[in-house]
Amino acid sequence: MSNDSGNAPPVEPSEPTDLGPGGPSAEEAPGTAEGYRPGGTLLRGATVAPGLVLGTVHRKDYDLSRAGAVRVALDGVDNELNQFRGALDASRRQIVDLKSRLHGRVPEDDARILDTHLAYLRDSVFIADVENLILNEQMRLDAAIAKVVGDFDRIFRLVRSDSIRQSAVDLRDVGIRVLRNLEETGPQLEGTAGSTESTRDAYVLVANELSIVDMFTLANDHVKGIVTLEGGLTSHAAIFARAMRIPTLSGVEGLLDAVHEGDFVILDATEGILRVNPDDVVREQYASSSNDDDAIEIKGGGVERQVPEWALRPAATADGEAITVGASCGNLPEVEQALEYECAWIALYRTELLYLIDREPPSRDTLVHHYSSVIGAARGAPVTFRLLNLDSSAGLAYLHATAEANPSLGRAGTRALLDTPSVLRRQLQAILLASNGVDVRIALPFVTDCGDLRRVKEVLFEERIELRKTEAHFDERSGAVQIGVVVETPAAMLGARDLAAESDFLMVSMDSLQQYLLAADRDAPEHAAMFEVVHPFVLRGVAKIVAVARDAGVPVWMFGSSARRRESLPLLIGAGIRNFCVPPGELRTFLGQLDGIEAKAATAAARAAMDAACFDETRSLVSGFRHGYAPD
C-alpha cells in the first residue's frame, strides 16, 4: 500500500482524485444526492477473530429444514446409496487432508476438533439412519441427510449442556460437508446451487451461522473472511477462525437482508463492522492484511502471536548502518499487522478514512473511540497521527463548500483545516482525549510556512485548556503532544530551517515533494519516467532538509511509494535519511532491499547524483552502476 498521492495529498498514488466511478465527481460532489453514503451500508457485529479483508460475497444459505421429504423411484434407491458412500469417502479424505495442511499452523488441541468430524463420518448410527430413510421411505439422499441431522439437532438443542449442543453443530457440519460433495454430481439442497467452490475465487463467506465446513472450500483453501447472522464466540468454528486468523464477525443483525451474492464488502472484524458496496476511494483506503507462512511463535505476557522470521532481523544496511523503520497505516488492522511484524513505531497514521465513509463529519466520540483503538492496538508503540489531509476533490461540503479548479493547489491539508476550525478543533480534541497520558505525535500536512504551524499550536493549546474545564477524566499529561510538519510543498522545503526550529520533528512526503518540485503530475502516464528515480534537484532538497534538521536536533522521517523504489532508496539513504515509514504489507520487501545496500557506497552515489545537472545524468548513474547496492 502506498502513502500519499501526487495530485491530492491524502489519496494513494494509484487512486483517482475524484471519488471513483461509484461516487460523484469533484464538480458535483458538494450537494450530492440525499442518502448517498460513500462508505456503503454499515453493519455491526461481534468480533470472533480480528482482521481486515476486502472481497466479493459468497452466500451459504444452507437451510436443512427446506429439504422436505423428497422421494425417488424404487429403481433409483441404489444410486442414492452409492452416492452417499462416495460422498462419505470424499468427505473423509478432505478432512484427513485438512488435518495435514493445518499441522503446525493451529494448536494440536484445536486440530483435534476435526477428529470429531471424522468420527461422525464413520458413525454407524448416523450412516444407518440415512440409509434406512433411503431404503425404507425411498427418500432422496439430500433430504435424508437433512432429516437425520435435523432430528439430532432438535434433540441436542433441548439439552442445557454446551458440549452436547456443540455436538449438534458438529454433526450439522458433517452433514453439510457430505451435501457439498453431492452438489456437482447429484440433486442439490435448496440454497446450495451454483457453489462450485473448486472454481470460485477467494471470497468473503456470508452465512446464517458459523460453521467449520464453510471456512474451507472443497479443495481445503480457507475463505478470506466470514460474516454470520448467528454464532457463538466459544464454538468450535470460532476456535478455528481465531487459530487460522480468518477475520470473522458474528451476530450481524439484518445481514441476510442487506448482503447479496456478489456484493463487494469490506470486513473490518477488528472494529466489528462490515461495509457493503462502498465507493472506490473507501475501498482503496483499506488494505487487506496477509498471513505469513514463515512465522515463528513468540510467547510473552500471556500473549501468543506469530512473528515472521524476517521481521525479527534488525533493520540495517549491508555494512551495518542502522535504519529506523516505522509503519505507515491507514486503518486499525494495519496497525495490528505492523505490531505482528514487531514494528516499534506507528510512524504515520493517516486519519482520512473516517471522513471519507460518510457525507457528514464523524462525531467527536467516533474519533475518540477510533484513535483510542489505534493507540491500544499499538501496544505502547509511539503513534504519529497525521491530521486530515483532503482537498475539494473529496467532495465534503463541510470542508469545501465548492469544488476548486485545481484542488491539489487549493485548500488542502492544514490550509483547509485552518479555514474550517470546527473540523480542526474536533480532531485535536479527539486526539488529546484518546491519548490518555500516552505519548502521541501530530503531523501537519500541506504546510506552507511557520504561520500554519503556529496557528495549529495555538488551537491545540486552546483545546487543551477547554478540555481541562469540561472533561473531568481528561489526563493533564495528554497535553504533552509533539507537533511536526510534513514537508511536501516547495515553500516548506525552502523554509525547512525555520520549520525545524519550531517543530519537534519533520516528515518528508516524497511523492508530493517530487511532484510539486518537478511540476509534473505523477499519475499522468506521460510523466511516469520522471519518477523512476529521484531527480538530482529533488535529492539536493532532501539533503538540505536532513542538514537543517540535524542542526536543529530534530528527527526526519520519510514516506511515500517513490521513497521505497529500488532505484531511489540508496540515494535517499546516501542523502542522510535514516527513518522511513513503510506500509506493513511492504515491510518484507523494504527490509530485503536494505540488506543489499552499503551505506558508504550509497553516500558516494548520492553525491554523484546531486552533482548531476539533469535527470538523464542521474538515470545513467543508476543504470550503469550499482549506486549503493553491494555486489552479489
Image (spheres, grey):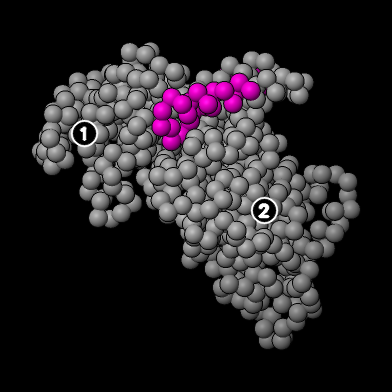
| Nearer to the camera, 155 or 333 | 333
Q: In the figure, is residue 426 to the left or right of 506?
A: right
Q: Examine the structure image and report whether residue 106 is included in the region drawn in magenta.
A: no
Residue at screen point 85% across, 53% down: 157
Residue at screen point 70% across, 36% down: 365
**In this view, 248 is above or below 496:** below
**In this view, 279 is above or below 85:** above
The amino acid sitting under disc 2 is Leu
User: Could you classify mark 1 by the number of other residues whose Cα lies within 10 Å: few (under 14), some (14-19), or many (20 or more)?
Assistant: some
The location of residue 94, given as percent across then percent down, is: 55, 56
The answer to which image quadrant residue 477 occupies is top right
Q: Secondary structure at mark 1?
A: helix
| Nearer to the camera, 149 or 342 | 342
Give the magenta range.
435-462
The answer to which image quadrant residue 479 occupies is top right
| Nearer to the camera, 69 or 205 | 205
Residue that mark 1 sits on: 537
Residue that mark 2 sits on: 42
Give the mark, 2 or 1, whose residue is nearer the N terminus. Answer: 2
Q: In the figure, is residue 38 to the left or right of 251?
A: left
